[in-house]
Image (cartoon, rainbow, N blue to C red):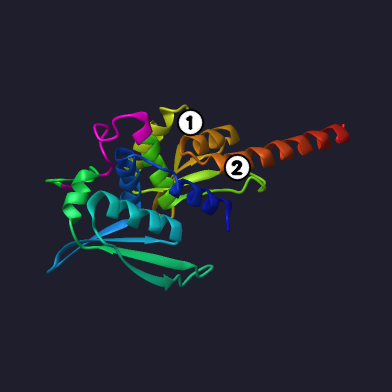
Amino acid sequence: MSFASDVKDEISRVQLDDNQTKARLSGIIQSLASLSISNKGLSLVLKSSNANVSKAVAKDLKKLYDVRSEFVISKQTKLDKRNVYSMVIDEKVKDILNDLDLWTDRGLLDHPRMMFLSNDEMIKAYLAGLFMANGSINSPNSTSYHLEIKVNSEKHGSFVIKLLERFNITGKMIERRNSYFVYVKSSEMIGNFLILISAFQSLLYFEDVRIQRDLNNSITRLNNI
């Protein structure tokens, strides 16, 4: 299992109050869900390759809205052919989107409004949801530090960067293969992000490996001198 998967598994188990749960769900559903319309009405389809993320979403939807989620498991056709967990919600869809501040009378929003993310704890939960949905982070054993979150649009990316700045984390945005990503490359700021999303066990491992690697690099430089 990758380091990024370990982080997602850890934060999927964090205990949240109802408002924080809504904020995390808002980030996950905004990132993973597609909206379909049929003769039965609106449906949400969420696809994730992380089983624990899918379980957390199903649990939170049941807790907050008393809705059932239908699962379909398939295999990716590319790369490592991991399982893909498709979750279908076909009841209370508009009510859920409204409650998560992702829907207005004009349609879907680019991101929830700050009146919804009303305090720091809700912002942290929202960022955790975005990472659970579409985040990645290099193993601290790799040769470089890199954390990124795939966002829905350039406007959404700018919004996420402003949220990170609130906690003194500098994010930048890049367009790659017609998609936008917000990324952080500073090891210190990546550590701060792990604190932000309550990934404390992952942080301890990250810092332990980072400090050991920096020490080894320092010894190598001294030997070279």
Q: Position of residue 10 (x, y in %)?
A: 50, 48
Relative side of 88 to 166, left or right: left
| Crowd band around label 2 with a 10 angstrom C-alpha radius: few (<14), some (14–19), many (20+) | some
Q: Quadrant of the N terminus?
A: bottom right
Q: Amino acid at mark 2?
A: Tyr
Q: Does residue 50 appear anywhere in the picture?
A: no
Name the residue rendered at 87%, 36% in the picture: 224
How many numbered markers are drawn?
2
For the point 58% across and 39% down, which residue is it?
203
Main SS of the magenta segment? loop
Q: Residue at x 21, y 49 (%)?
A: 97
In the picture of the structure, the residue carrying the numbered disc 2 is 145
Which residues make up the magenta segment? 107-122
Q: Is residue 186 among the parts visible in the rendering?
A: yes
Q: Which three-letter amino acid code belongs to the residue tagged 1?
A: Ile
Residue 69: percent from left, percent from top: 29, 63
**Where is residue 205, by image quadrant?**
top right
